[in-house]
Amino acid sequence: MSASEAQPSAQKHLFPHQPHAAASSSSEKLEDGMTKLPNGVILDKDGKPCRLCTSAASWRNLTRQAKAQGATSTSTSSSTSPSAASKPVAESTSLPQTRDDCPPDVEALGRSTWTFLHSLTASYPAKASQEQQGEMRTFLKIFSRLYPCWVCADDFRTWMAEPSGRNEPRLSGRADFGTWMCEAHNEVNRKLGKKEFDCRFWEERWRTGWKDGRCD
């Protein structure tokens, strides 16, 4: 969901990792003790870096750091200055264009998934049967457990299970479901400090196209 619009702008990311959740600090190390992790790298449940939970910039810093340490290890074994091993790798300030044929990072995965989820609400029946509501409820439960970024999945499950029940999926029909999905997306936007989408326009954005004809 990357396109900006003259109407309220569309949301841009999926249930991305929260800045505080499982993010590495300068004191965390990989399981094999290879090196300190760059900021922003998210660890998987096995303690290793999770590519699908980490931004492309942070992943590039991680691979650059691993290569640098490999080179340092080789040189120190040949009696190079011992101080070289302690030099930190500077975080990348440039953002080279991401290739389309590489594994997605958390942001690319998020954009694609939001597109899918909002399109799912757009194709949902105007009035759903009990069977259709049950199928969608089952899908959302499975989705929130199998989504590739485990931190994002945990966050979505926690949001849906809010004790008051206000975030439970509203599945009676397209209008309610579409608004609910928009609210779920806006929850993420708030956490990331991004502009929220005006949910009154969710159907124009994801189903019918804008009334000014720009999508025709």
Image (spheres, rainbow, N blue to C red):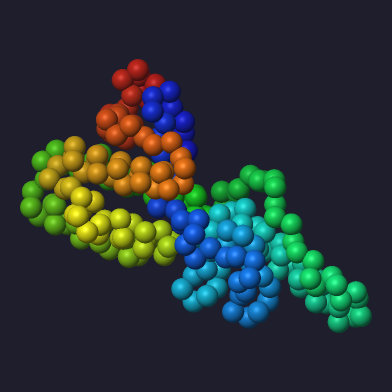
Give the left or right position of residue 187, taking residue 76 as reference. Answer: left
Against 108, is 6 above or below? above
- Which quarter shows the N terminus? top left
Residue 116 visible within the image: yes
The residue lying at 46 percent from left, 56 percent from top is 18
Against 195, is 29 above or below? below
Residue 1 visible within the image: no
Q: Quadrant of residue 216?
A: top left
Measured as percent of width and height from the top left, residue 113 is found at 39, 50
The residue lying at 59 percent from left, 54 percent from top is 56
Foreground residue, 88 or 103?
A: 88
Q: Quadrant of residue 84?
A: bottom right
Give the left or right position of residue 59, taking residue 184 as reference. Answer: right
Give the left or right position of residue 12, taking residue 23 as reference. Answer: left
The residue lying at 46 percent from left, 73 percent from top is 45
The residue lying at 59 percent from left, 79 percent from top is 31
Foreground residue, 38 or 165?
A: 165
Give the left or right position of residue 157, taking residue 26 as reference. Answer: left
Residue sitting farthest toward the left: 130
Measured as percent of width and height from the top left, residue 87 is found at 79, 66
Residue sitting farthest toward the front: 164
Q: Quadrant of residue 151?
A: bottom left
Measured as percent of width and height from the top left, residue 25 is found at 60, 65
| Number of disc labels | 0
Foreground residue, 31 or 121?
A: 31
Measured as percent of width and height from the top left, residue 42 is found at 53, 64
Against 33, is 200 above or below? above
